[in-house]
Amino acid sequence: MKKLSQNNILPFCLTSLLLIAGCDNSRDSDNESAGRLLGGIAGAAIANDRTDGDPLGTVIGAMAGSYIGGQIGRDIDQSNRERMAIVLEKQPSNKTSKWIDPDTGVVYEMRPAAAYRNKQRICRPFTLKLHDPDGSGADYMHKGIACRGDDGTWEVVK
């Protein structure tokens, strides 16, 4: 068996974590945990690239990304997912919908694009922006795709 070199440990770990994260298909999965996982992966990848593979920089990047990802995941709770589903269902294409989470003060902006069919499902690309109410610069933007299931609920697939 080949030993992993320092150059290919990060891609190996990232691939493993993504496969593990893909196994959780429950509707009520813990957003904070998922945010921490994905934020940690992104933070590690960015820091690894910016520090030319310095292990300490990569670890610090993973920790920072994990913290920020957990905050984002905690902010997207059930009521905000319901608002997102309403926007996907009813909002005209390329029109931004904006709301404020009354518990956190986070400002949401969601802009769905035109719907299309993918394997008999209606799907819509969207852009979601979260603005930190404290102005600490922890804003977040995600471009993704959501598809409507047979039961009428929307699921983010990308």
Image (spheres, rainbow, N blue to C red):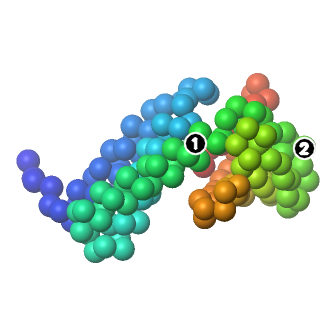
Q: Is residue 86 left or right of residue 67?
A: right
- Taking the spot 60% from the left edge, 64% from the top edge, the residue there is 137
The total number of labels drawn is 2
Categorize mark 2 by other alpha carbons within 10 Å: few (<14), some (14-19), many (20+).
few
State which tag comes first along the sequence, 1 or 2. Answer: 1
Q: Which residue is at the front of the view, 158 or 96?
A: 96
Q: Are marks 1 and 2 in contact (CB under 8 Å)?
A: no
Dot 2 corresponds to which residue? 90
Q: Which residue is at the front of the view, 147 or 109?
A: 109
Q: Amino acid at mark 2?
A: Lys
Q: Amino acid at mark 1?
A: Gly
Vertical side of 31 occupied by 27: above or below: above
Quadrant in the picture for residue 84: top right
**Can you see residue 148?**
no
Dot 1 corresponds to which residue? 73
- Percent x, y for residue 105? 74, 47
Residue at disc 2, secondary structure:
helix
- Taking the spot 78% from the left edge, 40% from the top edge, the residue there is 102
**Can you see residue 56?**
yes
Name the mark nearer the viewer: 1 or 2. Answer: 1
- Percent x, y for residue 15? 35, 50
- Percent x, y for residue 91? 89, 49
User: What mark, if any, has residue 64 been given in the picture?
Assistant: none
- Taking the spot 35% from the left edge, 71% from the top edge, the residue there is 49
- Percent x, y for residue 31? 56, 36
Question: Gap in Å between the C-alphas at discs 1 and 2?
Answer: 24 Å
Categorize mark 1 by other alpha carbons within 10 Å: few (<14), some (14-19), many (20+).
many
- Taking the spot 14% from the left edge, 61% from the top edge, the residue there is 5
Residue at disc 1, secondary structure:
helix
Q: Which residue is at the front of the view, 56 or 109?
A: 56
